[in-house]
Image: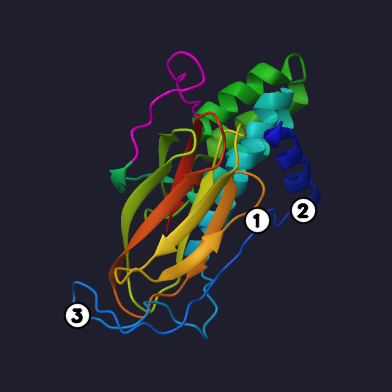
């Protein structure tokens, strides 16, 4: 299973646990809708900030949650809940311009697992059984609550069909680090691509699993086309996260 291989690689790589592949294309003479020319990316600046790091941590939290649910591991879910509480994930309303989310695994797609702090803590208690020490840790995380800033990562859950591509339009501010991350259900390989309004490829993340992240700094405030490509033969339920 893709998820099994992915989780082994994720845990082995902690605390980073994030694969990043960035491609910066050359200058383009094409002009965007707002009249801006060229490629909307700063090439000589490091695309890192507390906000982009929060996106990375949210992706990592989803990875740990998937592992915890697969292995019935209470501690993994407790750590995932703690990360979610730290970054303060907010609901997102990304503009989805392509992708129908139909089920092709046989029957309707099941309801998504609740990866909120409260949902993770509830399942951690369930998996803990009679382990009072783990229950106490879960209770501590629940009491602390979400401590992330109001402007924390924005996340939404979608389903991408087999051999299909979901497309989103997301705006980012010029001169500020931008990040887009995805975390899938483990059944297929998902790849992530980001294009500016001139059609230039800004970032591509093509790891062997379904957790990917792209980071860059826009030269100007603009709208980017984000593509989530499913290379597998069945659908994949994933979360998309942005700063």
Q: Is residue 167 magenta?
A: no
- The residue tagged 1 is 18
* Quarter assignment of residue 224: bottom left
Residue 191, how many percent across, how many down? 54, 50
Quote the CA–CA distance across marks 1 and 2. 8 Å
Nearer the observer, 80 or 219: 219
Asked if labels 2 and 1 touch by Cβ distance under 8 angstroms, the answer is yes
Give the mark nearest the N terminus, 3 or 2.
Answer: 2
Residue extent of the magenta highlight: 99-114
Give the mark nearest the N terminus, 1 or 3.
Answer: 1
Q: Quadrant of the N terminus?
A: top right
- The outermost residue toward the left is 34
- The residue tagged 3 is 35
Query: Considering only vertical position in the picture, is 98 above or below 18?
Result: above
> What sort of colour scheme is used for the picture?
rainbow
Query: Considering only vertical position in the picture, is 23 above or below 107?
Result: below
SS at mark 1 in the image? loop
């Amino acid at each position: 299973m893709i998820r099994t291989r992915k989780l082994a690689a994720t845990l082995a790589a902690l605390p980073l646990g994030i694969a990043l592949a960035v491609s910066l294309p050359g200058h383009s003479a094409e002009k965007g809708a707002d009249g801006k020319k060229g490629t909307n990316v700063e090439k000589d600046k490091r695309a890192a900030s507390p906000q982009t790091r929060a996106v990375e941590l949210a992706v990592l939290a989803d990875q740990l949650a998937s592992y915890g649910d697969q292995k019935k591991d209470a501690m993994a879910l407790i750590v995932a809940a703690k990360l979610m509480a730290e970054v303060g994930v907010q609901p997102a309303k990304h503009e989805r311009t392509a992708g129908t989310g139909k089920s092709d695994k046989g029957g309707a797609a099941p309801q998504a697992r609740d990866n909120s702090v409260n949902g993770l803590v509830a399942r951690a208690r369930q998996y803990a059984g009679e382990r009072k020490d783990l229950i106490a840790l879960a209770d501590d995380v629940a009491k602390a609550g979400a401590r992330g800033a109001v402007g924390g990562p924005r996340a939404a859950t979608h389903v991408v069909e087999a051999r299909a591509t979901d497309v989103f339009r997301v705006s980012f501010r010029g001169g500020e680090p931008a990040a887009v991350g995805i975390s899938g259900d483990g059944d297929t390989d998902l790849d992530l691509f980001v294009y500016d309004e001139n059609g230039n490829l800004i970032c591509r993340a093509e790891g062997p699993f379904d957790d990917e992240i792209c980071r860059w700094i826009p030269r100007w405030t603009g709208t980017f086309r984000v593509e989530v490509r499913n290379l597998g033969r069945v659908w994949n339920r994933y979360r998309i996260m942005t700063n």
